[in-house]
Image: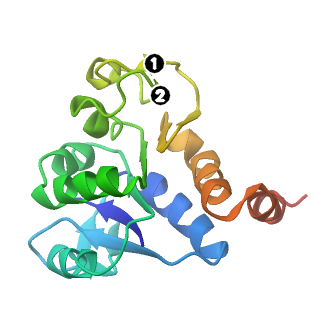
């Protein structure tokens, strides 16, 4: 199971670009609305997005399915809303216990960072959020992959981030094929 969380104020491109690329790769990725108001979540730029699942539906699904990856888009206050979510914490704990990938972009690397999950790992984030990467080796790179943790610096790296996630889950050849189609000349 691949889960991407959408909380009010999420950065739309950071959520939708990886989502699009992973679905192009044929992966079953589901979005979860981290809100009490159903499945429609408004992003940082007032773009409403309808998620696939409510938090309750995701929690029910988690009882029977193994997590392959969770994705945390940035944007503010979206990343702060994810950071405060008990549902996101549950999925982080489950992902760690199951050895699943935890991917975060922009401000969202602060979420695993504040929990010490990036300690001793290469990581990147949006400039100004380095202080939350507790013990990480901050690189200022565009995308960093270190074990089961993938971090990216922000919206400008969203496609690169999505392709890295695709390569992890489907292989380099699949990611290269999608990149060739996306960047066709």
Residue 25: give x, y in percent of width and height. Answer: 67, 72
Residue 163: give x, y in percent of width and height. Answer: 65, 54
Q: Which image quadrant: the N terminus?
A: bottom left
Q: Which residue is at the front of the view, 168 or 73?
A: 168
Compare marks 2 and 1 and give the one earlier in the sequence.
2
Residue at image position (41%, 21%) is: 120
Tell me if 20 is positioned left or right of 151 in this view.
right
Q: Is residue 6 above or below residue 113?
A: below
Residue 135 is drawn in which quadrant? top left
Tell me if 21 is positioned left or right of 177 in this view.
left
Residue at image position (31%, 62%) is: 5
Residue 7 is drawn in which quadrant? bottom left
| Image mark for residue 138 | 1
Residue at image position (41%, 22%) is: 127
In this picture the colour scheme is rainbow
Q: Which residue is at the front of the view, 147 or 172?
A: 147
Q: Secondary structure at mark 2?
A: loop
Q: Is residue 179 above or below residue 127?
A: below
Tell me if 91 is positioned left or right of 11 in this view.
left
Residue 44 visible: no
Q: Are marks 2 and 1 in contact (CB under 8 Å)?
A: yes
Q: Which residue is mark 2?
A: 124
Residue 116: give x, y in percent of width and height. Answer: 26, 29
Q: Which residue is at the front of the view, 107 or 45?
A: 107
Residue at image position (84%, 60%) is: 180
Q: Which residue is at the front of the view, 157 or 103?
A: 103
């Amino acid at each position: 199971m691949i889960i991407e969380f959408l909380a009010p104020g999420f950065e739309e491109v950071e959520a939708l670009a990886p989502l699009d690329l992973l679905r192009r790769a044929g992966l079953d990725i589901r979005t979860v609305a981290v809100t009490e108001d159903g499945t429609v979540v408004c992003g940082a730029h007032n773009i409403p997005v309808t998620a696939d699942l409510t938090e309750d539906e995701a929690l029910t699904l988690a009882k029977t399915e193994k997590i392959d990856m969770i994705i945390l888009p940035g944007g503010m206050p979206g990343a702060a809303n994810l950071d405060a979510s008990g549902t996101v914490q549950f999925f982080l704990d489950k992902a760690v216990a199951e050895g699943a990938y935890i991917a975060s972009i922009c401000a969202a690397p602060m979420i695993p960072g504040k929990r010490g999950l990036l300690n001793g790992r290469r990581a990147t984030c949006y400039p100004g959020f380095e202080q939350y990467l507790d013990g990480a080796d901050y690189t200022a790179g565009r995308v960093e992959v270190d074990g089961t943790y993938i971090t990216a610096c922000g919206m400008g790296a969203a496609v690169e981030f999505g392709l890295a996630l695709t390569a992890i889950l489907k292989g380099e050849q699949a990611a290269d094929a999608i990149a060739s189609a996306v960047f066709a000349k």
